[in-house]
Image: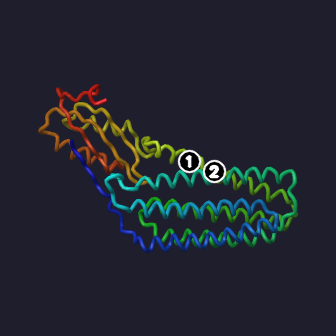
Amino acid sequence: MAHCHHHHHHPEISFENLNRVFIVSVILNAGFVVLEAAAGFWSNSVGLLSDAGHNLGDVLSLLLSMAAFRLSRRKVSEVYTYGYKKATVLASFLNALLLVAVSLVVMAESVSKFTSPGNVEGDVVAWVAAAGVVVNGLTAFLLMRSMGNDINVKGAFFHMAADALVSVGVLVSGVLVSMTGLMLIDAVVGFCISVIILLPSLRLLRQSLRLLLDAVPETVDRSQVERLIRETVHVRDCHHLHIWAMSTTETALTAHVVVDAYAHADEVKADLCRKLREEGIHHLTFEVETDGAECARRVCG
């Protein structure tokens, strides 16, 4: 049995600093959700209500991400031998479910507004949306300063930056309603926002479900990995190849590798570790066999 484990060496991100950023971001966005929802009901704006629903999803998303980040740092135990790294995948799945649900509710509400748009206070919509641009933009800025090379924090940053752009859309709809008096504009914007939320949310849902079921991550080409293993010097064959995600940032691999002689096992292991690290796989375990070994596929199961 040959095992190769390698830790990523990214620039160190202060846990305390990132934790403060998450807390401030949650407070800012939670306060804005209350303000935006109240303004949406008062002004009868589905655009504001849709954006408030999305921002509520952002608050829960930030909370889930923060909880998952804390769990992923906990040490392994006799029961959780990989630690709690998979919590980041579970958080991603729950976030996706939440966003899909919110977008479908907003879409249904927007469709109902097409038949009975009601009166929309365009000025109120514009002012509240402008506040949303500031809140989301500030949150994105705080995350950008603290994200380093952490792909999860980068994802939160891009999400908040996208939200700032959505708020710009609501701001434009409020101005247009105020200038033209066309109430349907608000319903159209609300519907468009729900679609903007739904499409990437469905993709995130599919990706996170895939990782939860221990499928090969989309960032890894299984056929390419198998080819690299088979083409390694002294390797005769490869079987029982399994690749799965330990977290949203870490990938593991196990495989039975047939070599021409046990004397070359260490050399093969070193070559495979080097090659597969370049493919983004850093947790590697190999069962080394020779051509005449008893451990065949039918025996291993």
Q: Does 96 sit above or below residue 148?
A: above
**Left or right of 245 on screen, residue 28:** right
Query: Residue under circle 1?
Result: 205
Q: What colour-coding does the image apply? A: rainbow
Q: Tell me residue 157's x, y (percent).
A: 53, 64
Q: Which residue type carries mark 1?
A: Leu
Q: Which residue type carries mark 2?
A: Val
Query: Residue under circle 2?
Result: 100
At 57% from the left edge and 69% from the top edge, which residue is drawn? 26
- The local secondary structure at tag 1 comes to helix
Q: Tell me residue 210's x, y (percent).
A: 49, 43
Check if mark 2's residue and mark 1's residue have beta carbons within 8 Å.
yes
- For label 2, the crowd category at 10 Å Cα-Cα, with few meaning under 14, some 14 to 19 and many 20 or more, is many
Q: Does 277 sit above or below residue 134?
A: above
Q: Earlier in the sequence, mark 2 or mark 1?
A: 2
**Left or right of 282 on screen, residue 169:** right
Q: Could you tell me which quadrant the N terminus lies in?
A: top left
